[in-house]
């Protein structure tokens, strides 16, 4: 399952993502993961949320990013939800058709492993591909 928080840069998407991660801890029976392009939000997250800074790893392509996510999934079968801040930047996605494929890929991963992905996407909600329309949780 995928949920999307969409809006142009600077609209406050990260605030909603952080709040969602911290709220998820209360109901979680498994692990909560927050993946970001840096570690600056470390002190805003509950200490039960695992923060992963992708800048610490040599991820330069979308395929490498998907492999990285699959590696995380293979190491921890108890993951319930993964929050991905700055998704387009971390996943090296630029074009709309690339995002269409990414949404399909992450939907398939979520369905296969029973994980919810919450993506922060820096685009106007109306500019997202058609397969994202029913997955928008918050549009700013």
Image: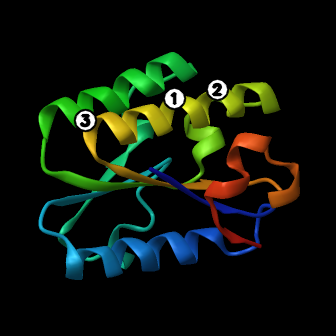
Which percent across, then down, holds residue 105?
51, 29
Q: State the residue position of label 1.
A: 105
At x 26%, y 77%, the residue is 46
Within 10 Å of disc 3 (Cα), the crowding (few <14, some 14-19, many 20+) is some
Determine the CA span between mark 2 and mark 1: 6 Å
Q: Which of the two marks, 3 or 1, is nearer to us in this view? A: 1
Numbered disc in front, either 2 or 3: 2
Front residue of 127/17: it is: 127
Distance CA(mark 3)–CA(mark 1)? 16 Å
- Which of the two discs, 2 and 3, labels the residue nearer the N terminus? 3
Q: Is residue 58 visible?
A: no
- Relative to residue 20, is residue 54 depicted above or below? above
- Asked whether the beta carbons under mark 2 and mark 1 sit within 8 Å of each other, the answer is yes
Based on the displayed image, in which of its 4 quarters is residue 6 positioned?
A: bottom right
Residue, disc 2: 101
Quarter of the image where the C terminus is located: bottom right
- Alpha carbon of mark 2 to alpha carbon of mark 3: how far? 20 Å
- Quadrant of the rendered image containing residue 92: top right
* Disc marking residue 72: 3
Q: Is residue 139 above or below residue 90?
A: below
Against 123, residue 22 (above or below) is below
Q: How many marks?
A: 3
Q: Is residue 102 left or right of residue 25?
A: right
- Which residue is located at x 25 percent, y 27 percent? 71
- Asked which secondary structure carries label 1, the reply is helix
- Counting residues from the start of the chain, the first of labels 3 and 1 encountered is 3
Q: Position of residue 122 (x, y in %)?
A: 73, 54
User: Could you tell whether 62 is left or right of 109 in the image?
Assistant: right
Q: Position of residue 57 (x, y in %)?
A: 37, 29
Residue drawn at x 71%, y 26% is: 98
Q: Which mark is residue 84?
A: none
Q: Which residue is more in the foreground, 42 or 79?
A: 79
């Amino acid at each position: 399952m995928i949920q999307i928080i969409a809006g142009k840069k600077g609209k406050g998407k990260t605030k909603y993502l952080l709040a969602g991660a911290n709220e998820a801890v209360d109901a979680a029976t498994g692990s909560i993961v927050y993946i970001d392009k840096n570690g600056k939000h470390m002190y805003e997250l509950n200490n039960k949320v695992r923060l992963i800074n992708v800048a610490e790893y040599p991820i330069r392509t979308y395929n490498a990013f998907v492999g990285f996510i699959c590696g995380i999934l293979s190491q921890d079968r108890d993951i319930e939800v993964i929050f991905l801040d700055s998704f387009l930047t971390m996943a090296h996605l630029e074009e709309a058709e690339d995002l269409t494929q990414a949404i399909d890929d992450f939907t398939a991963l979520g369905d296969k492993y029973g994980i919810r992905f919450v993506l922060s996407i820096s685009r106007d909600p109306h500019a997202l591909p058609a397969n994202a329309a029913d997955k928008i949780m918050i549009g700013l």
